[in-house]
Amino acid sequence: MILYILCLILFCVGLYGVLRKRNLIKIIVGLGIIEYSMNLFFVLLGYRFHGRAPIDAQDHAILNMVDPLPQALVLTSIVIGLGVTALLIAIAVRIYEKYGTFDITKINRLKG
Amino acid sequence: MTLIVKTITRLTVGLILLFGIYIILHGHLSPGGGFAGGVIVALSFVHLMLAFGKEVAAAKVSKNLTSNLESIGALMFLGVSLLGYLGGTFFLNVLNKGTPFKLMSAGTIILSNISIGIKVGVGLFAIFLALVVLEGAKKGK
Amino acid sequence: MDQSNFIPLFVIIPLAAAFLISLLGKFIKWFSDAAICVSSALLLWFSVYAEIALKSSAQGVLIYKVGGWVPPFGICMVLDGLTTLMLIIVNLVSFFVALYSLKYMEQYTDKTKFFTLFSLMVCGMNGVIITGDLFNLYVFLEIASIASYALVAFGTEAEELEASFKYAIMGSIAASFIFIGIAFLYGFTSTLNMADMARVLSLKSQTWVIPMVTVLFLMGFGFKAALVPFHAWLPDAHPSAPAPISAMLSGVLIKTLGVYALIRIFFNILGVTAAYLSILMLLGAVSMIVGVILALSQWDFKRLLAYHSISQIGYVVLGIGLGTPLGILGGLFHLFNHSIFKSLLFLNSGAVDYAAGTRDLKEMGGLAKVMPWTAKTSLIASMSISGVPPFNGFFSKLIIILACIQKGAIAYALCAVIGSILTLASFMKVQRYAFSGELKEKLKGIKEVPWVMRFSMVGLALVCVLGGVMLLPHLRFILDDAVGVLLQGRNYAAVVLDAALK
């Protein structure tokens, strides 16, 4: 139970980073923290009491394993996070070329 | 980069590539598979670029080659899934599922892993190349 | 089973087209144009065929088990009434937009990459519509979203990059809210198949999980649909994209990723109660009023259209939030109509931009003399969105207002009428400033747009004019099937699982 609450605290740390930091790169890092905390939460959901890793091996009998389905889903989610981060970094580099700054309070030409 | 880094890179970059290929191929037996193995393969190229500079790495795997290989990887994956139509449904596992725990078991999973490994590895290196080329073009102005 | 073999093609065709264009577009010059035309036409043909195949099937749903795995152990693709309506909307609009962008994207740098991303976005949207599995919906939603982030920044001007950055950050946080919701639902029901989850949820007792998941999904999908507290990204992102992408984003993306996913999960899986419906109605009404009031002061053509998108999605959510058969019919019909006339309006603004080079309403004037086709289709679209008879917008707005009065929510009906009047005022301003009046000096030399772009605009305008025939008894079954799917609520589980295990 305490582990789930720690995951949500990590989510709030990332959210603080996205909302309050002014540097573009720090916002991207905050978004990364949000995504990884959610992946961690999902993997933790699969824990079974006294379970072992869900790898089928020749010498072990099939005893209680933890749930392997969240692990497969989180693999996909990590790659989605990778794709978004790569896109955001490319956009941030181009923004630096056009605006000359990484400060988000100065990048506000779109108004109204 | 200094001589120490260059020497160690020359010794280890091939081993990193081999390790990445091992993880891709044994995806159905141990943790890993296409994504994780692909990232390690990409990291071997990035290691080469960090130690020796952009030109050496780009000479080994040029930008055109990465772009083409990425599309070929995706089309291979689509092809593997369309192979299932031979058996009746989309994405069916049609190849021979041999004895478990051997390398050549579990049908089409190994082909899917290989195509995803190619795509992710080459794709991640292409992202890195694009960002480095952008940086170089900006500094050159 | 033979009858439903064509269902994966909705995902296979755009995916194959995207990567073939990316590979061969560099070597063969005309390949990208030909491939995108062929794939869009094939998808449109298959979506019409899906409607016919569904009508002639025995159970009323068509199930396709991916990989031969029986649900709930595997992913299944479900084709029912709501799915076919959304498929027709998405593929019709993307066909016309693909034709339009053959000529429009000549002024940008790289058409090959554009068509790759466009195909990936269509693949993602089709995947969201046909899937029957909740995590599969999340994956396809992310595919379509990431393609749209890249497409908004396609021109790489300063403002486009800023808009795309804001849209990408906010969109990723919204997607992570959806992911938390899916994680909670998986932990509670230990299954991911939508039908099985509905069955398990109707057997378990009410706990705190269902309201929490409802709020999380409202936040996540409400962002994608641009409902009012979450609408701030839309006026920046939609004008910055190239005009065909604005048409796709405003016309189909906010509908499939936002409204369709929201109503599929709320009505069929979680099961609506009166409290949730009243929240939907409130959000819809607030979106209507806020969107149209903020649009009154805009002088940028595309930004004005983007604010009107917020307002019209408010109509759709209000209609569906009523929960009565007439209300849901009005909401879904307005969904169809809004895709058609909003994409047409964005394509018009793109045509004006292509010919005259400006988006500012104060700099335009008298374009009707030099661009007759654009002016006529723009007039048709403006009358449709304002709800002037006999165009299609009038019928759907009338049905929504009648359904509000029928349920007794007079205040919401009044909001809808006020929103409609203000929309009419706003579009009269557009027509007067852009198309009628005196032709300005510097605009005297412009010509009408090429015939491919004209063909797309005329095609969409024809669907606008003839849209009312969807309510005639022959074609009414398309909408009635969709309404029936939503009204059956959690019975969806029984229908789908029954058809899947056959």
Image (cartoon, rainbow, N blue to C red):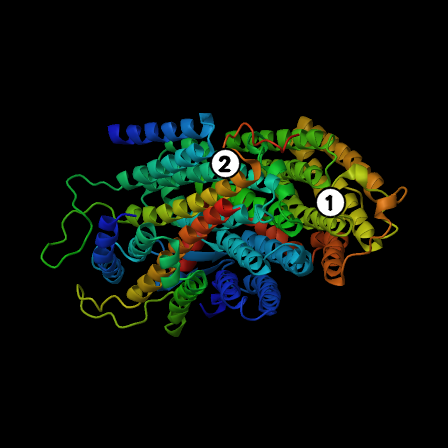
Chain for disc number 1: C
Give the side of residue C99 with respect to residue C264, left or right: right
* Amino acid at circle 2: Met
> Mark 1, mark 2: which one is toward the viewer?
2
Can you see residue C141? no
- For mark 1, give the secondary structure: helix
Horizontal and vertical percent position of residue A70: 30, 46
**Residue lying at 38% horizontally and 27% vertically, measured from the top left:** A12
Q: Which residue is mark 2?
A: C170
Q: Quadrant of residue A107?
A: top right
Q: Do callouts 1 and 2 point to residues on the same chain?
A: yes
- For mark 2, give the secondary structure: helix
**C257 or C236, nearer to the observer:** C236
* Amino acid at circle 1: Gly
**B103 or B88, nearer to the observer:** B103
Q: Which residue is mark 1?
A: C393
Give the side of residue A86 with respect to residue A100, left or right: left
